[in-house]
Amino acid sequence: MLKIEKKIFDWVDKNKLVLSVLAVTVLTLYLRKIGVWWNYSYVAASFDMHQNYTESSLYYVMVRLVQELPLLPLHSIKWLAGLCDYVLVYLCIRCFGERLTRWKEKEVIWYIILIFSPVLYIRGIIWGQIDSVAMVFLVLALLLWEKKRVVPAIISAIIACGLYPCLLPIAIVYLYYVEKEISLSYLLWLIVGTVVLLGGASLVLGGSFPGGVETLLRWCTYNVLNGSLFVSGADWLMQLVILYGLPVTTILLLGTLRGKISYKWTVLAHVIVTVLYGSRIFLEKLY
């Protein structure tokens, strides 16, 4: 073996974990590039502020902002969600370890498993939804809270709930039941902050403050796509599965990473959500 060959092999062996991360990142980015060009029939309805629009007012502000990027409007949203997948995976890994100054085998294995999550892929890059963007702020809030940085944590949680109002019950349950010593004033700041953020976002869009606040609850009473009231319990339950699919699987994952929840429950949840997301019958029923 030539000396240069030995140096190359030694370098590859020394940096194999970093190279693995780079290779997986390139591959998953390519898969996301493919998904960007696939759209379901009524994709425009997700970005249409119809009469009883159920997406949050802050969400529509974000949609307006990303449409200023030099990309097709839908592609801008999809790439925002797709890139936040990587941030979310990194934050999840941070939840069970110290700051990643150097990749270790355990972190690399989890990175590969998480970034290939079909729930992440379908919900974000395929459907063009911003669940992962909101979850980035929610998991960041968790990390900040555990470091006793209360004010930044509350602000991050407010942004998460403003983008994705159905996360508010999750944030309240965590603060009240998990952080039992918490002052109720923090819960009040979380709720009031979210209300003010949504109302202010509505004003930015030319609407009314109360109209923005209403989006805090519309997700649980109106169909996301057409703004109509649910006509059956099955439709309502189906929307809950859609909305809570990524948040629930992410929370179970964090519990697994910290050894508090069996990996079997996390895998089972991922399988169930993936099957429901990918089911042709489910998609036809929803859209």
Image (cartoon, rainbow, N blue to C red):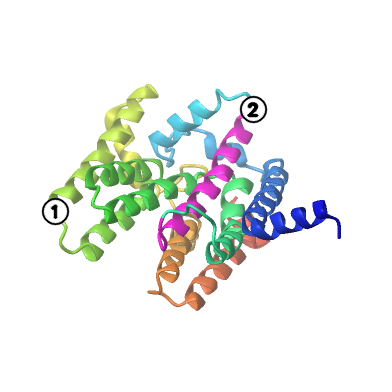
The stretch in magenta equals: 72-98
Give neighbour class at mark 1: few <14, some 14-19, many 20+ (Cα, 10 Å).
few
Compare residues 176 and 166 and report the one nearer the observer. Answer: 176
The reply to whether the C-beta atoms of the residues labelled 1 and 2 are less than 8 Å apart is: no
Mark 2 element type: loop
**Which residue position holds label 1?**
184
1 or 2: tag closer to the N-terminus? 2
- Amino acid under disc 1: Leu
* Residue at the extreme right of the image, as rendered: 1
Is residue 93 found inside the magenta-colored segment of the image? yes
Residue at 29% in and 32% down: 199
Q: Is residue 274 visible?
A: yes
Give the camera-side residue of 24 and 39: 24
Indicate the amino acid at tag 2: Leu
Q: Position of residue 192 (x, y in %)?
A: 21, 41
Q: Is residue 100 magenta?
A: no
